[in-house]
Image (cartoon, rainbow, N blue to C red):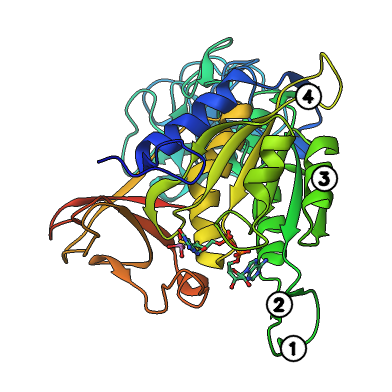
Amino acid sequence: MTATAARGIAVVPWPQARDTARQAGARGLLPGAETEPADALGQVLAEPLTALTDLPAFDTSAMDGWAVAGPGPWRLAGQVLAGRTPPPLADGWATGIATGAQLPPGATAVLRREDGRVSGGPAPAARTLRATSEPGPGKDVRPRGQECRLDEQLLPAGTLVTAAVLGLAAACGHDRLTVRRRPTVELLVLGDELLTAGLPGPGLVRDALGPMLQPWLAAAGAELLGRRAVRDDFGLLRDALRHSAAEVVITTGGTAAGPVDFLHAALAESGARLLVDGVAVRPGHPMLLAELPPVRPGGPVRHLVGLPGNPLAAVAGTVTLALPLLHALVGRSAAGRFTRTSQGLRGLPADTRLLPVRLTEDGPVPLAFDGPAMLRGLALADALAVLPPGGVAAGGRVELLPVPN
Ligand SMILES: Nc1nc2c(c(=O)[nH]1)N[C@H]1C(S)=C(S)[C@@H](COP(=O)(O)OP(=O)(O)OC[C@H]3O[C@@H](n4cnc5c(N)ncnc54)[C@H](O)[C@@H]3O)O[C@H]1N2
Ligand code: MOO
């Protein structure tokens, strides 16, 4: 029999929940805008990155030494430094050249400094260059267009702009990049028992989710409009949902069936449509995803991700629903990360298990303190391993999900 969540939607298998979040985001793909490259870091290319030039843009010396024309020995004429435009080189002549300098027209190869001997008088033209090891045609030359040609597509739309992408974009001549606008996010932290400073006391716990989710979501490309504590009050929560200006509202806590777990009721009163209400995964079982009606008639649909209050369960909800939704809103390609495990990894009979692991030479190693209310294992983890029902046998393939870093 299919397990059913309290509000009547079937609890879905973990892969289906993630797909639903991706599809919801893809329906709301955000527009692209041109930006300064430095501001594009962590955002996603809205258009393919194409080369604005051949790379290299000119035939380039790959070594310090001499540009030579034809077979040796050669007579010597001057030198070419990086940044200069050299005169042509006639057959039988050589010129000193630096790594990265433009090869003179007529040069056929580069002779490395350590492979040549110069003999003869003090005047350069009276000197002769001989090779201890004759360079074949094109040796140590990076020919124009070796890396790419003008207009060639280098990266597809959907690529995350990393430091390496900024470097490549600069190398091929870009002064602006077109990236998707960041999705706006509001984080609502629910629970009267939560403290934002000081020591946990009787019945009181420190809010562990605000400090973890805020930087994590920002690093995932969200524009945080704010993080607010919302008391355990139905009306306050309903109004916070109704009026949030964010495209994605993320709540923590209140997803289950406790006396002050008002999230389902507040969603119902706000006119929300549940897309996921409970997932066959541990931890994180009561996570949910909903569409929220626009704040003003005709405005865009908003989304709500309800993360369970137990901290590791909230992490599970983040990787299952929040990040796939946010990534799909900006069209970020959903490339999976996989590894092999040398030891068997124990799963659950019917649910997916998300397990904090360290990555070692032998594959993922489970960390202790992986209970739903704990973060101690996660804080040492390199990833969360996705263990389908029944687990993964030794030698099997395991999907890895990101953890906050
Ligand atoms: N009768 C049932 N009880 C519970 C069920 C269930 O199916 N039936 N599911 C359990 C599971 S699984 C989880 S996970 C939790 C989810 O609970 P809620 O989302 O309603 O969260 P709360 O009740 O508000 O809090 C649970 C737990 O987490 C602590 N918490 C909450 N927010 C934070 C925070 N920001 N930082 C640190 N700790 C936080 C809170 O104090 C509670 O200890 O429900 C089970 N119960
Ligand atoms: O989803 Mo809950 O995390 O199993 O405690």
Q: Which residue is mark 1?
A: 199
Q: What is the crowding at mark 1: few (fewer than 14 residues within 10 Å), some, or many (at least 20)?
A: few
Q: Earlier in the sequence, mark 2 or mark 1?
A: 1
Q: Residue at x 40, y 39 (%)?
A: 130
Q: CA distance from mark 2 to mark 4?
A: 33 Å
Q: Which label sits on residue 206?
A: 2
Q: Which label sits on residue 294?
A: 4
Q: Which label sits on residue 240?
A: 3
Q: Nearer the viewer, residue 390 or 290?
A: 290
Q: Earlier in the sequence, mark 1 or mark 4?
A: 1
Mark 2 against mark 4, which lies toward the viewer?
4
Image marks 1 and 4: residues in contact by CB distance under 8 Å:
no
Image marks 2 and 1: residues in contact by CB distance under 8 Å:
yes
Q: Nearer the viewer, residue 119 or 378?
A: 378
Three-letter residue code for mark 2: Arg
Q: Is residue 152 above or below residue 239?
A: above
Three-letter residue code for mark 4: Pro
Q: What is the crowding at mark 4: few (fewer than 14 residues within 10 Å), some, or many (at least 20)?
A: some
